[in-house]
Amino acid sequence: MDNDIQNVIDDIYTVTKHRLEANDPLVKVLYFSLFIADKHQYILADILKEIERHCPEYTQLDNERLSMLPDVLHMQIERFNSNSVKFVERKELINYSQKKPTNDLDLEESHESLILEYVVLLTILIGLATIIEFYQKF
């Protein structure tokens, strides 16, 4: 059995607690959705429209299976989104660890902007403390 089909069956079970066979129309519809999801940028409504138009197994779904479809698709999209966020974070971490200052001037500008941010924050805090102290006297 194809690993993707097994993943679809496992996803269905995770969401619905129903164990389905590989030839079940819902499994085939969700398997089809794996190939079109990226094209539709993992937008649930667009994926459902595409399934309805181009997947012949969609017409074979009974009411019970139709009610399962959005939940499983939503879970798959959420998993993709969380995996892509992890991928982006990992990629940014790798890029950051490989990034080295090109010269001392860049490093100095970085420190100067950080110091400026702290000065602004400290000024705001002092201003707030002064206002609070002023109102506490009354």
Image (cartoon, grey):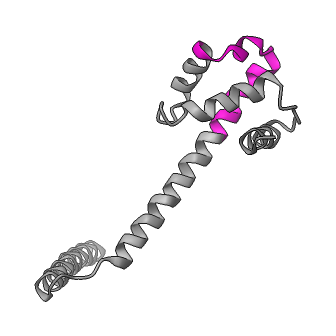
Q: Which residues are magenta?
A: 53-75
Task: Tell me: residue 135, above or below residue 6.
Answer: below
Q: Is residue 111 left or right of residue 34?
A: left
Question: In x, y percent, where is residue 71?
Answer: 69, 33
Q: Nearer the viewer, residue 92 or 109?
A: 92
Which of the 4 image quarters holds residue 83? Answer: bottom right
Q: Quadrant of the N terminus?
A: top right
Q: Is residue 96 left or right of residue 75?
A: left
Q: Quadrant of the C terminus?
A: bottom left
Question: In x, y percent, where is residue 15?
Answer: 77, 39
Question: In x, y percent, where is residue 108?
Answer: 14, 86
Identity of the residue drawn at 56% across and 26% down? 47
Task: Tell me: residue 90, above or below residue 103.
Answer: above
Q: Is residue 20 left or right of residue 40?
A: right
Which of the 4 image quarters holds residue 61? Answer: top right
Identity of the residue drawn at 70% across and 16% down? 58
Question: In x, y percent, where is residue 38?
Answer: 50, 37
**View extreme (front): residue:** 1
Q: Main secondary structure of the magenta part?
A: helix
**View extreme (bottom): residue:** 104
